[in-house]
Image (tube, rainbow, N blue to C red):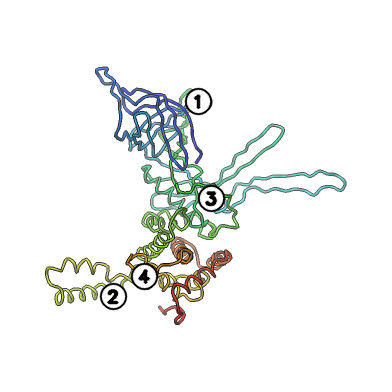
Amino acid sequence: MQPLDVTGSFWLPGPGQVKRHGRLVFDPKDGATLFLSDALAEKRADGVMVEKGGGNPNRILGLIEEPNHRQPVTLIDCGWLNRTKYYANAILIGGHFEDDDQTAFESVIVRLRDAAPWVGKNAISVEVDSALEGVDRREVVCRLDRPAASEGRFTRGKVALDFRWSREDVELESVKVNQWPEFVIEYDELTPLTRIYGDAGHLYNLSSLCTDRKDSFDSIYVYRSDHPEMLLSRKPIPGTRRSIELKARLGDPTQRKEVKPLSAHDVLVPLDDLGGIQAVAAWLDKAAALTPIVGSLLTMRSEGIYSENRFLNISSAAEGLHRATVGGSYLPPSEFRRLRRQIREKGVPAEHHAWFADVMAHANDPSLDRRLRDLARELPEVIHALVGDDVDAWIRAVKKVRNNLTHLDEGREAFDGADLHWLAESLFHVTRLCLLRRIGLVDDHLHKIAKSVRMQGTLHYVQEAVERVAGSRPAPFVEEAE
């Protein structure tokens, strides 16, 4: 999202409000701050001015000065820093929305920084002819062919992948053409802004998982039919919807340094390999239930996290994915309940029944060993390219480190930070591919993805970490019969 630094007038919603001159600053990493010339105030029916300080005003409205025109703006979820300074969690540029009921929209367009290489559709072709013999001159022909749009249905509406372009000309000197893909969500009914935040975040997460790095938002625009485009005479244009730009600190606020452009060649899971727009639609249906899992998983690509915390986050994501999508139990539930009842009745005094119930609450859950084996069996043809030749030793190493870091006992074994990193990296690859298989990634593409991972030259670090942590090697991993 582009930064913002503008001046304007600002006031609280409702009648009798007093406008104050101010400066609105937005930074994608630090969020939005409003600096006012004086405290916000309102005039009561008796004419007395009442200053508004402290608390949470929720909404602040304004008109900001832009070249040749003034734009209405709404600051949402505002926090009082001092009498003339407020923080806002979000800004809507292009309209006034006084309450939560008004901040519901029919459509949203999300543009992501890494969408172009992830989508992998090149709309611009350039032809340069050969120089004629003895003539130092070449002819250049540029052509832009917009790829066809595609769309898919999900439970609450439809999502489309469309393409847009723009040009910048310097008369008699140069022309610049830009093209980009964008994701358009059309909802079946008005959708609250908080839900739109979530959907935009799901698109961000999916792109980050597939491109193997944290993405960022270029822009987010929302639309509703009762906010049409206006003529200069202030008359609405029938059948149009005005663009309402959303600015908020979304994505990964810890990512401070600029990143280099991503090439399509470096994308781990291209959108077409994932299943195209249908996979995106499936993701929008499933992602809400998987948000904590995906959040833990993506800390692998976050900055400023200790190796121990990163490893625990990734192992939690692996366990969570198995629990949410595979499930299972050590014993059949009816047999486990019978066994638990027998133990309680024969060996647990009545005063300890509550303690016993707590102890046994998760006793029938599959072990971490079982969960890792189930996930590994989902990737039989590529698992060795991700974790090394000895899958059993890898499972032992992951289990040993997880148990050690979870139970902070005195005298526990200390692990090298590099070993923790490479074990987490391998577990991240396994969990991510198992997750993406659930929304459309077909097994035919796994070999190419595993080869790309292996080409990064990190597998031998994983194997060395496994050998140091797990120790001796027992019999090799064998897939169990169904």
- Please state if 370 lies on the left or on the right of 241 as rendered: left
**Distance of label 2 from label 1 (alpha carbons):** 70 Å
Task: Give the mark nearest the N terminus, 3 or 2.
Answer: 3
Circle 3: residue type: Ala
Q: Residue at x 64, y 47 (%)?
A: 124
Dot 3: what SS?
helix
Disc 1 designates what residue?
Answer: 69
Task: Give the mark nearest the N terminus, 3 or 4.
Answer: 3
Label 3, residues with CA under 10 Å away: few <14, some 14-19, many ≥20 = many
**Distance of label 3 from label 4 (alpha carbons):** 35 Å
Nearest to the observer: residue 346 or residue 379? 346
Disc assigned to residue 331: 2
Where does the image place residue 256, in percent across and percent down from the top left?
49, 46
Q: How many marks?
A: 4
Where does the image place residue 67, in percent across and percent down from the top left?
53, 27
Circle 4: residue type: Leu
Circle 2: residue type: Leu
Nearest to the observer: residue 482 or residue 60? 60
Which quarter of the figure is the C terminus placed in?
A: bottom left
Circle 1: residue type: His
Disc 4 designates what residue?
Answer: 368
